Image (cartoon, grey):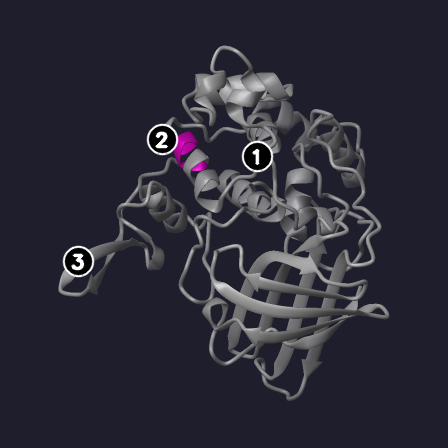
Amino acid sequence: MKQIVCLLMLSVLVIGGGYAVDAAGFNDVLEEHFAYEAVIWAQEYDIIDGYADGTFKPNLTITEQQFAKLLANYYELETPYDELKKQTPSANWSDEYYDRLASYGVPLNGYFDNTMRAAAIKRGVVAQAITHLADGKRSLDASIQFLIDSYISTGQNPQYENRNLQKFFGVSNNMTRAQVVTLLHRMASRNYYEISEDAQEIHLNASNASLNTLASNGQKQLDKTMQQTTPAKSAWEGIYTYYYKWGKGATDYNRRDAIITNATSKSFYISLTANDGQESGTVDGTATITSSSKAVMNKSANGNRCVLEFERLNNALKITEVDCIAEHDEGTNFSGTLKKQ
């Protein structure tokens, strides 16, 4: 594995006569942000990329599929010849990363279900996935202890230190994009580049097990408290898509993609992407269900005003944007009727 030498590439943003330094062009990661150096490092070595609006969204909750991409990129994992055969067969941008991680038996939940991939990842899952590649197969407690002993993590709840390891680490809490990048940066600074013997042995696959079998074994390695079951059969939950190609040019198209997860009787979490040729935008947030077929979201997960109205149709989702300009480029919006996949 290559040795990484960090070259701190700083871009300068002039604000009101003073100078504020942002991280490698991300206008929302300024020098005073705790993850500033980690973000510079991660972008320099193609571990991360940002959003179309020039932001990194460091405080946004990270999904499992976003984490999968960062982890696969950090270790430069090889791509297997086989591909996962998912329960949700529609193509997903994260497929290649899950294929790579599956071939090393990394413990994750979302190998076979696109909806699980779009859900927020728990700190306990992050601990087991990282430790599997860095130090070998480990239980949840042993994985946490490895991160702490290696000074990769300092825990999250100091009141439980030396009393309850899992509560000290905060295994059930979500993580932000900045927090995960910081963990990987600490791993790099401590020379954790080599893939563990356990993971290498799984990748060599002497028994010629299918990629699905390797992925399933990875799922089972997760502590039972970290394992997700098949998403609830809520009428709202699912993957919704709209695509229209109106010309022959590479950018002559309109596309909308929505993933609804964690639906209850009162709310659901939605991740939405809109692309109108060269203009694009993304938004994540929680919508409140107002009737059996309608819901509304008033602000994004970033805390910005973003009013979207949702209507559940027969195998479709109608989305009407009322005001969401803070979350996307001016040339597009989130409105449309998307077909359930």
- Residue at which label 2 appears: 189
- Residue at which label 1 appears: 173
* Label 1 element class: loop
Q: Amino acid at mark 2?
A: Ser
Say if residue 79 shows up in the picture.
no
Tell me what residue is drawn at x 63 percent, y 81 percent: 253
- Out of 59 and 320, give the one closest to the viewer: 320
Spatial distance from mark 3 to mark 2, Cα to Cα? Answer: 28 Å
Tell me what residue is drawn at x 73 percent, y 43 percent: 111
Q: Residues within 10 Å of mark 3 (few under 14, many from 20)?
A: few
* Label 3 element class: strand
- Residue at which label 3 appears: 19
Spatial distance from mark 1 to mark 2, Cα to Cα? Answer: 25 Å
- Out of 228 and 209, give the one closest to the viewer: 228
Magenta range is: 184-188
- In the figure, is residue 85 to the left or right of 18? right
**Picture layout, residue 35 above or below residue 46:** above
Point out the residue furthest to the top here: 162
Q: Amino acid at mark 1?
A: Asn
Point out the residue furthest to the left here: 17
